[in-house]
Amino acid sequence: MNHLNKNNIVDSGIHFRTLSYLLLSVCAINLFQGCDKKSGHKINIDTEYKAVLLDNGQVFFGKIEEEGPSYLVLKDVFYVQSQVTERERDKREVANILIKRGNEWHGPDRMYVNSNHIIFIESVAPPSRVGQLIKEATQKP
């Protein structure tokens, strides 16, 4: 007959459970620490202006001045504003206008964007419509 001490079985169960919790905790900590770290790579887009799409649907066009671990600094920032005009009864026309930031009441000269809200960053090609409008806007006195 196998004589196992009941206390040994209980002790080994407690040790196994404690070891399991400890191992699970270490794995969870490593997983969550890795989720928040940035790769350390700089954005390598060779055009002067970039398009930055945020998770709320807003798009800003600007020059990346600085890249931090949790933010991006844009200078010379533009955005598109849609204006609806009513031509005739039940006929509306939508015009998209490129607006330069900085003319607001508080006169911002740069924009800090939380990296957690950036969906993607793309180049703005100089011959594109946005690139042409930015060039026209920056050449005005």
Image: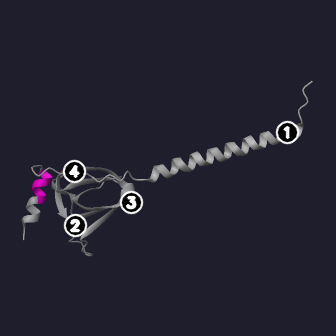
Q: Nearer the viewer, residue 75 or 133?
A: 75
The quadrant the N terminus occupies is top right
Residue, disc 4: 45
Q: Amino acid at mark 3?
A: Ser
- Which comes before the other along the chain, label 1 or label 2? 1
Q: Quadrant of residue 136?
A: bottom left
- Return the residue found at the far bottom: 106
Residue, disc 3: 70
Please determine whether, in this image, residue 141 is positioned above or below residue 124: below
Closest to the camera, between mark 1 and mark 3, is 1
- Which comes before the other along the chain, label 2 or label 3? 3
Q: Amino acid at mark 4?
A: Ile
Closest to the camera, between mark 2 and mark 4, is 4
Distance in Å between CA atoms under marks 4 and 1 = 64 Å
Please determine whether, in this image, residue 134 is positioned above or below residue 24: below
User: The residue tagged with tag 3: helix, strand or loop?
Assistant: loop
Q: Residue at position x 27%, y 52% from top?
A: 43
